[in-house]
Amino acid sequence: MNRVVITGTGIYSCIGKNIDEVKHSLYNGISGIGVDPKRKEMGFRSSLTGIVERPNLKGILDRRMRVGLPEQGEYAYLSTAEALKNAGIDDDYLSTHEIGIIFGNDSSTDPVIETLDLLREKKDTMLLGSGCIFKSMNSTVTMNLSVIFKLKGINFTVSGACASGSHAIGLGYLMIKSGLQEMIVCGGAQEVSMLSMASFDALSAFSINENDPTKAARPFDKDRDGLVPSGGAATVIIESYDNAIKRGANILAEIIGYGFSSNGEHISQSNVDGLTRSMKNSIKDAGISLQDIDYINAHATSTPHGDMSEAIAINDVFGEIRPYVSSTKSMTGHECWMAGASEIVYSLIMMKNSFIAPNINFKNPDQYSEKLNIVNHTLNKEINVILSNSFGFGGTNSSLIIRKV
Amino acid sequence: MTNEEIINKINEFLIEEFELDKNQLIPTAELKKDLGIDSLDFVDIIVIIERNFGFKVKGEEMASVKTLNDFYNYIIQRVNKPLN
């Protein structure tokens, strides 16, 4: 079995457009949340959202590469370009090696809507253009990036709701561990557009604290009133330890555990049993003891039920050990399909720079979160092992463990 | 619309939408070989023609269009003698 390491990271999110900007936001507890007034005009219950600037890739990518690239694909292009650069992978290496790509993505809403609106107007499929199909499919990110970066290995998308990005890294880890691939570009991407969040808003799951947007996302706090939708893209370059050593790469961390489970119960509400099994499975896979885990990057989105379930599950698994816990969603909002990947990137930034990012807005615990060791102010501390949780609709759960090398 | 206006309009969208250089747009240039316009680009050209000239192209009508000059002539013919 191969050891699996991370040698490059890239990020494009509401708290920064690259690793350095995001590091600054994480360390200083800066929120990326704001309001989108158009959502109110459209009858949204909440206008809160992560504020992510849409990049202009004209002049960077040629027309054919842009025509089929949707919003979240643009973010993913930028995060992947940054990750490859950080990993020391150039065009020559890409063209001479079998490198794979696995991304988490679970929707591509605007292209579907725009295509069908156009069809209703024109009543002629020949007037839809060539890009709609490639923008509309769930696999849009991997199909586009594999062409842009000329990748020749494994190539598919994971749709696992809000655990998509985490499962993508987990599956990449398994493929490299077993020797099926030497290097894989893994990550998650999430559209931020208003229309992509309409049906989620319908569930009344979003915070309505619109008067104070940066205080709206407050995971584990007793006064939390829902999550804030957000997005962007995050990329990690993973490869076998031997390959990283051979090419003299800078190893950021080792992936040592991937655990997963399904709740087998409610479509939107998590349960303690599923979350507990996901964490335990990752710890078993890592072959470490509970005491080895320094920090848990929680899934906690700021919904009353979800945070409660995770708090109980963490307490059930760790009890008196009480590792440090924080949810970076307090600053980023819930990055949905991307979150499992972005939170690995956030965790790597913390590991590299020896700090734990704060769970901002955590003022008062409830009866469940009071049992956890929640970090609500930046903590300067060396951390060696991190557990990152991601849970999604349908009860899909994923837990990843990374360790400093 | 004069022939010159039609040709200018075609050149304009090839430069704007397809990011071609003005110097590439010589009448004998082959659309695929010289201008790099592939089968997917033809799908977009149908959309652009409808937007700019107001008629719908049938895919098979473009089959005999090989060079930029063929393309000019095809559009000029359709604009001057509308089929529908």
Image (spheres, rainbow, N blue to C red):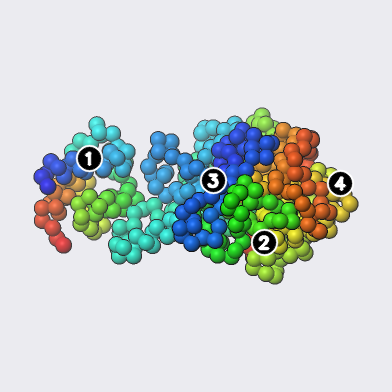
Q: Chain of mark 4?
A: A
Q: Position of residue B33 (x, y in %)?
A: 29, 41
**Is B32 on the left-hand or right-hand side of A27?**
left
Q: Which residue is mark 2?
A: A396
Residue type (three-letter) at the residue carrying disc 1: Asn
- Element type where label 3 sits in the image: loop
Please rate how many residues cluster around mark 2, counting C-alpha atoms within 10 Å: few if below 14, some from 14 to 19, many from 20.
many
Q: Residue at x 49, y 52 (%)?
A: A37
Query: How far apart are the alpha carbons under marks 1 and 2?
Result: 52 Å
Q: Earlier in the sequence, mark 4 or mark 3?
A: 3
Q: Which residue is mark 4?
A: A291
Please rate how many residues cluster around mark 3, counting C-alpha atoms within 10 Å: few if below 14, some from 14 to 19, many from 20.
many
Furthest residue toward front: A211
Residue type (three-letter) at the residue carrying disc 2: Thr
Single out the mark in the foreground, 3 or 1: 3
| Residue A405 seen in this snapshot | no
- Element type where label 1 sits in the image: helix
